[in-house]
Each structure stands twice: as structure tokens, then as C-alpha cells.
Image (cartoon, rainbow, N blue to C red):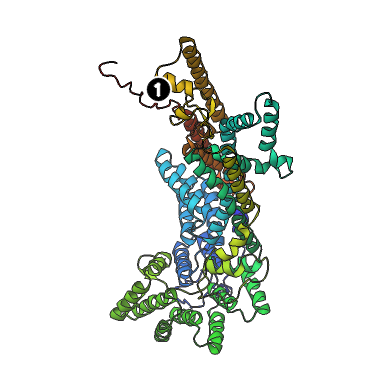
Amino acid sequence: MTRALARCVLLGAALPVLAASNSEKVIDVRATRPVAGSSFEGMWDAYRKADIAGDTDTSDKLFREIRRLRTERNVQSLEEISLALVARGQERLSDANRSGAEEDFLKAVGLDPHLPDAYLALARAEVRKGPLGILAAVKDTFAAMTARVDTARGRYFALLLVIPVGLLALLATISILAFSLLLRNGTLLLHDLQERFGDGREALAVGVFAILVFLPTITFQGFAWLPLWWLALLFVYLSRVEQAVAGLALLSGLLVGPAVDVLTSRVLAERNPLFRATLQTIEGGPDLRARDAIERGLASLPEDRDLSYLLAIQYKKDGLYDESAQIYREILRTSPEDRIALNNLANIEFARGEFPAAIARYKQGAEASPTPEINATFYYNLSLAHLQRFEYQPAQEARSQAERISMSVVRAYDNLWKYDKSDYAVVDLSLSEEQAWAKFGGTAEGVAAQNVVGKAVTPFDASKLLPSALNRFAGFLLVALVVGFVLSRWRGKRMFTLRCQKCGTPFCKHCHLGAAAAGLCTQCYHLFVVRDGVSGPARNQKLLEVQKEDERRERIFRALSLLSPGAGHLYAQKTLLGALFAMVWYGLLALVLLAGRVLPVTEAPSVLVGSWGSWIAGALLLATYVLANRARPDFEFAMPAPRSTGKRGRV
């Protein structure tokens, strides 16, 4: 894929000025640098010709000019040229020219800091250095993993992956939680049923218990409802911590609808050619397909000024400054107060060296900007225009104003649009990423909203997501409340069933009222707390039951932990730790299952990505599995202090 893109770039049209020249040497664009100069593709073609001809001086000048114009035109990503550099660097690396390959990879990073391919290729080159290059290779690999984080494309891929992985991990964790609690507390419900139906009707109690446990499948609701139903059915038998976790699990169902809606809205927008063209215009370089899509959209929606801004920005990125300026002038002719067109037209005048005209427009826009961000942008650009005329005091005053209005905006501009050491670029105004999602969210074609530039938007509108939360999961919450209320009323407070902490025997407070406060049945209470009133044979029998219960708990913990990390801790009432282990385990499994197979993680080719992701995931899975099995909970029960006999002098 990388080489194919590289060939497309290398076979692009030659620079127009070169075609008109009779000289064999590539023209030095710095000497005749027109503001509306050449396209990036043409300049890249000129650079390659100079490089092949061995004209290092001219090729270096051309590459510096590409970098300068990238900053001047506010192009965050020159992806095609960067991919061509990566492809050439890989060829050099194959020819054992490591230093030349590293130079190409570093140039690719400079032209597109958000391209994972460049960092991964650089990591491969670093590994060739031997042990000394491993640390740098790890650093570059991590940079590749996070390269797209600050881009709309990267955040879209992250959302596309995080929501399905989160939902799968949540479903699996809730299932394991419910199964573990059923395994430990199901006998308490069965005990209550047996007591209610009386002696000799154990079979009826077991039948009713089975019907209650599998009621969702019996009523054809589906197996997926079983975990939530078990949590509701056993809620009254759980400890406070378990009830809190179970309650959160039941409430988490309310997030499913909004999460799916957000994902669906993003997927539909991604299918929209106009939306893809918008993101390319915001974050990428010039693109003929994007320009064509915007032109067709503007023809059908001429009143949508956002599309006019996008088209003008596309023209500027491709070096067509006159065409871009004409669009802004037409907007200002009909809407003289349009601050977006005013700022961007001033930027074109700045690039042409018409600083007095640009300064006048910046001052006009700074007087009444609709938002603090736009106001800060006008003052920021004004300070740079004054610097070009060596007017240091007005420049400092304008920058101070920009910092006072929005320090975060100034810092972002300084970090993003800095060329070399001290040169900065004036910044164009356009749609933000949030405004682009608001404009195209949920629409596979056309737009969902018009003229959103300059307006405050929210990435997620809670009012729109609220209806999607009112689904079957919300209805099940009502069912869970009814079930919990009915069961608590059915048994009552005094007859609430517990499990003996020593021997595991189910008992209710009504039958063992005095011992229930200690969490022990009557025999264990007298044997381990009161320490009287228990015969020798009964004592031995009870100790044997306690020993068997300890062995049973240990076996179940081991079996559950081997089957699913965290399940044993959930059974052992280490609920928070068990839920954490389960969530991490199933989150990693879902990530391994979906990442790169069903859902994309990176667009870098497999030859660069390698298998590092699988190795990292495998190591994390192994660490989670071992830690969950090694972190054995303590089943020992802290006994209450022995009851005083009231006699002194006796032990």
C-alpha cells in the first residue's frame, strides 16, 4: 500500500514552471517564490528530480520550501508525500543504507507528525543499530501507537474500537459476576423455598428454584438476560459491597443504547463523502477528491457558508491563493461582519506580504468576535503581522491580549504552526472537529446542520441520547426493583437467610436469632464463640464439616480462577478485586479479538506493524491470569471475642 501511494506521488504532474524552463537544473523556488506557488505534488516531483540528479543543494532548498509552505498553509498532514518518503526509506533500508533511510523517515515525520508508518519505519531502522537502538525503537513504536490520538481520524478509530470492546467486556464481566454469585448464594434462595414449602416437598422447591433461575429463557427472552436476572433475583442475599457492584451492573445497561447510538452516528458520518472531505480539509493536505466533493456539496447547498470556507481552504492548501481570496471576498460582500472570512482573507494578504492591509483586517475582526477563541486568533495573527514589520511593542500588546483571552489557544497555535526555530504562521479559522461531527453526525449524505462555524457545539448532546437510554434495560431496572421488593417482603427481616461463615450451612435469623449477629449458625456459635454446650461427638462432627467447607471453597476458587480470572475472587466475596480482574481480562480478550481483525487500529501496513501488538496483548493476558490465580483470598473468618463467663480468676 505504501509503495503504491509512493508511485502515485512520484508519477504526478511536473511543476509548471519546470515545464516552461529550458534549463536542465531544477529551479530554486526560494529565488522566485510566488505566494500562490506550486502545488505540493509538483514541488515534490521537482525535489525528487533534483535528488536523483545529485543536486543536493537544490533538493534541500525545495524540501525546506515544502516544509515552510506546509506551515504557511496550515497543513497538518502531508500524508502522501510522507508515505512516499517512507517507501523510499524502506528501499534504502533494504539496500543496507540505514542512515539514508533514517533521514527519509525523519523527513516523513516532519511533514506528517501523525503518520504511524513513519514512526514504525523509524523503529525498524533503530533496531538495525543493535542493542543500543532498542530503547529508541521502543520509543518510536510507542509514538506510532499514539500518533493518531490527536486527530479526528484517530479518535474515530478509537471510538470504533473502544465502544464494542467495552460492551463485550462489560457483558462478560457481568456474566461472570452473576454466575459466581449464583454459585455461592443460590442455595440460600433454595433454602428459603424449602422452608416455605415444608418437609417432604423438597422436589417442588427444587422445581420452583429451577424455574426462577431460568425464567428469562423459559419466557423466550433470551440467554443474554440471565446474568442481569440472577443479579436481581439474588440481590437481597448479597453483602453491601456486592449489592453496590450489582446495582452498578444493572445501571450500566442504561449506557448501552446511547453508546450504540453514538457509534452508529459516527459510522454513518464516516460514510458521508462530504464529511470525509471536511476532515481532509481540516487536518490533511490538498486533495482533489475532497475539493470535488465540497464543490458538489456547495452547488446543492449554496446557503451553507461552512462549505464555502472549506472550499477556500482547499484552494489555499493547493497554492491557489487567488481563488481562495475570491471566495472570502464574495462572502464579505454579502456579510461584511463575517469574522471567519475576514481572518482568512487577512492571512492570504499576510502571505503575500501585504501587511498593512492584513493588520487592518485583524484589528477590525478583533473588535467584535463572536467567541473568545476567534477573538484570541485575531490578536494572535495581529501580533505576527506586527512582527513582520518589526513593530515589537504593538506585537507584544496583541499577543498579551490573545493570551489574556485564551492562553490555551495561543499555546496550541505555537505548538502546531511553528516552522524551524522561531517562525510562526498566522492561523486560518474553519470548522473544528466537534463542529464537523455536529454538522454531519448521523448523516450518510448531505449535512445534518448548516452554518455551524463560530457556534458553540457539544460532541455529545445529552438531550438526543436520553431517548436511546429508555430501552429494555431501563424496563428491566423496574423489574429488578419489583423482584427485590417481593423477595424481601416474602422472607421478612427476621427470617432473612444467611450462610454460616465457618461451616457454610444456610440458616435464617428466625431460627438462629442469637447467633446470626456473628454470622454463624447456632452450633458454630457455641463451638467457636461461647465454647460451651457442645458434646464431644457433635464438636468433632462440626469440625469435620468446617474442614470440608474450607476444602470446598478452595476447590471452587481454583476452578473458577482457572476458568476465568476474577471469578474466584467474586465467589470469595472479594468483589471489587474480582470485578477488576474480570474487566481487565475480558477487555484484553475483546481487544485481541476485534483489533486489527474486525475493527481497525492503524492504517499502517502489516510489514511495518509487525506482531508487537499481539506480543504485548499476550504478555498482559498472561500477567493478569497469573496474578489473579496467585492472589488467593483469605477464607479465614475473624471470630468474635469469646463471651465472658462473668467469673474472675479463671481462664
Q: Is residue 233 left or right of residue 523?
A: right
| Residue denoted by label 1 | 529
Element carrying mark 1: helix
x, y percentage for residue 469? 61, 57
Front in this rendered view, residue 235 or 330: 235
**Does 461 appear above or below 474?**
below
Please state which amino acid type lies under the numbered disc 1: Val
Q: Is residue 394 visible?
A: yes
Q: Quadrant of residue 484?
A: top right
x, y percentage for residue 467? 62, 61
Q: Residue at x 50, y 50 (%)?
A: 145
Q: Quadrant of residue 173?
A: top right
- Count of numbered labels shown in the rendering: 1
x, y percentage for residue 427? 45, 73
Toward the left, the furthest residue is 649
Toward the front, the furthest residue is 646
Front in this rendered view, residue 196 or 77: 196
Front in this rendered view, residue 230 or 311: 230
**Circle 1 Cα neighbour tier, 10 Å, few/some/many (<14 / 14–19 / ≥20):** some
Q: Residue at x 56, y 35 (%)?
A: 181
**Does 137 appear above or below 545?**
below
**Does 212 appear above or below 439?**
above
Position of the C terminus, as image quadrant, is top left
x, y percentage for residue 34? 48, 78
Q: Quadrant of residue 389?
A: bottom left
